[in-house]
Structure formats: structure tokens, C-alpha cells
Image: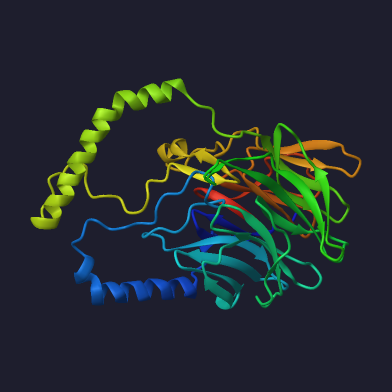
Amino acid sequence: MSTPGVAYLADGKLMLVMPGQRPRAVESKFVEGILERRAEHRRRHGWRSGGMVWNVNRPAMPDMMEGAMPGPDDSNPARFLSVVDGEKPGEIYYTIETDAIGGVFHFDVNENYERRLAHKQDLRLADLSRHPVDGQLACTIRHPDGSSSLGVMRNDGGGLHEVTAGDSRDESPSWIPGQANSLVYQSAGIGRDASGVIYGLAPYGIYELDLDNNRMTTLLELEEQDCLSPRIDSTGTLYYIRRPYELRPPSSIWRAAKDVVLFPIRLTWAFVHFLNAFSMFFAKKPLMTAGGPRRKGPDKRSLMLWGRWVQVDRELKAGGDSDKPLVPRTWELIRRSTNGDEQAIASGVVAFDLCADGGIVYTNGVSVFHLSADSHSGPGERLARGMFIERVSGLRL
């Protein structure tokens, strides 16, 4: 059984795993340039804002207004949003977003060379899929209002255009083998209140889009289940992730009572932090010195995965040593034959990809596994471990 190469996204970083080698991060020259420009700006203009405490940050958006993952922050100004295998072995495509611009890139693994294909202000592209014949790239285009559509571009990054529209989440496109110009993808309608704020999503279904005839066909819809990340192999077998559908997280009387009881404590704590910041601004001395140095970066306690917040406090407490998946075991990887027969081949699945040799790579959020073409169930061979793994792609060597 041959072991494939794997690329995966973990907490906004892109990692490569080659057989017999340790995982290594892809260092983007584009991101390095952003960091250098920011450092130079701080050196030149830091005196103007270095002491200010009333910094204006990007406002928090409602739960489902963001895309699949949170956007960049000050400690991590750029995020890798997707990765896919290239035309030749050792080549990959990926997308990156920053707080200002986003882009599509081509990377030669052997030469360690990055080529920028396209970039634009406020461009947020995810879920890349490369056509196996002509190299076209399909992707998800995320919009500021919380909706998303499918887009298609040439493999040089040019000619990007939308192929779906509407107030919905059209995501995770994948080219269908043996068909000239057809995609399979997931979609969920968006529910909004009277002011236009997203209230929730309908169940995700799976659909086929014939680009030549501009025809959409429903492949699978379940009332009580979300159907995610569809992929079709050369035999017509459909693979997808199935999870229980929830319009919104169920309300908790205990949580509401807890918020009422802790409100005075939280208000006092906020006032103390304000005075501490006030002291730092004028006296350059903190009022609070206990607790050691402040940890850099956001306090990550949850991930947004396909419109659903997933709590990760347990994994943080375990220090990355836990083998339990980040998502419930009810998130199952399903194999659906052309006659409708289904088989659950792995549980607790966050993302997966079909390999060129018929195998499967998938992740439970903390590990990446490989199932050979003749395997019928997981967990399979472990290829890598990481923290907060959100996407995975098999690579040809």
C-alpha cells in the first residue's frame, strides 16, 4: 500500500507531509512581504499609535456572517483558505486571505517557489478544485453579506466569474470525472430576520451543476441531516460528510442563569481591565502583574465549520495529545453507490479528499488518516498530527 503525500490547513497555516518526512509549513513570499511592510510601518509610524489603547478592531459579526473560518487577526495577518493538487506531481494551488486583499497562488514544492496568479482587494476564495483535464479551477467566492457562490477561473488565475447566485451558501465545488464541464457542490439557503441579519441556514444538500447547459440537478437532500463536501469518483460513487442538522445551537436555561449570576463579576472585571489600560497609557505601569506575560494571539475556543461553531476547549486543555476528534462522531464520512446504498466508512470527520489512486485522506481535526483503495472503514493509517486541522488534500508524488 503506497502512502500519498498530503497537504492540510491547520489554524490558517499550510502544512505539507511527504512520505517518510516530518510535516513542514509552506512559507509564502506573499505573506512574508505583508509582514515586512507592517514591520516597516511600525518602525516609521509606531510612535503615533503605540501608546493608544482605544484601537478600533474589525467589528465582530454574527455567528453565521463569516465564512467557514474566522478571518485574519493582528497576530496572524494572513490565512490559507484552501489547497489543491496541481497539474504535475509536486505542484499545488492555494488561496490566501488577509484583512485587506486575497489571492490565488501556484507553488512548486520541489523548487520551493511561489507564483502569484491573481490578487484583489476583499477577494475571499476557498474550496479550490482543479479540473483533471483542462486545469480549470473551481472555487467558493465568499461575499460580505454572509452568502457565497461558486466561481470558475483559468489555471493561470484569470477569467474568474461566478456560476451560481442567490441568497445561499454554495460551497465546496468538485469537478465530476468523465464529464466535460460539470460540478458537484453543497448548498444551503440562508434565513434572515427583518433587518437582514442571518438567523440560520437550511440543511445543506448536494447538487450537480452542468456548466455547458446551465442546468442544476438535486443529488441528495435530507431533512434532518447536513450533506457536506461532496466528491464523486471515476465510478460515479458519491462520497460526502453527513452530520445532524441544527438550525441554531439549542438554548440553555442554565447558561442564561449563569450569565445573570456572573454579570456583576464580569462587569467588575471589565472595569479593572479599563483602569489597567488607563494606567498603562498615562503611567506606563500596569495595575495587574499576576498571571505572567500575556499570551499572543486570540484565545481560540471554537472553530466555524460549515456554518456551525465547534467548541475546542477540550483539545486546548489536552495540549494536543488527545486522539478524540474535534467534531462529534455523528459527523460521518459516507460512501454512496450509484444505486443509493450507503456505508459509513469513518466517524468524527472534519474534511476529506479522494486520492488519484482511489484511496482517501481525511482528518478528524487533530490527525490526518489514509484509507487505501481497498479499505472499507477507518480509521486507517495515521499520516500526521496537528491542531485545528480544517482542510486536507491528497498530493501526487
Where residue 15 appears, as percent x and y from the top left, is 54, 60
Where residue 30 appears, as percent x and y from the top left, is 48, 74
In the picture as drawn, the residue positioned furthest to the front comes out as 194
Residue drawn at (85%, 48%) of the image: 237
Q: Nearer the viewer, residue 205 or 288?
A: 205
Quarter of the image where one finds residue 256? top left
The answer to whether residue 359 of the structure is visible from this angle is yes
Classify 209 as above or below 192: below
Residue drawn at (55%, 50%) of the image: 389
- Specify whether 103 is left or right of 218: left
Residue drawn at (37%, 46%) of the image: 299
The answer to whether residue 366 of the structure is visible from this angle is no
Q: Nearer the viewer, residue 353 or 269?
A: 269
Residue drawn at (58%, 44%) of the image: 307
In the picture as drawn, the residue positioned furthest to the left comes out as 283
Classify 260 as above or below 389: above
Where residue 333 appears, as percent x and y from the top left, is 71, 41
Please tell me how many numbered marks the rendered image carries: 0
The image's colouring method is rainbow
Q: Nearer the viewer, residue 4 or 307?
A: 307
Quadrant of the snapshot with the C terminus: bottom right
Q: Nearer the viewer, residue 200 or 394?
A: 200
Where residue 65 appears, as percent x and y from the top left, is 53, 49
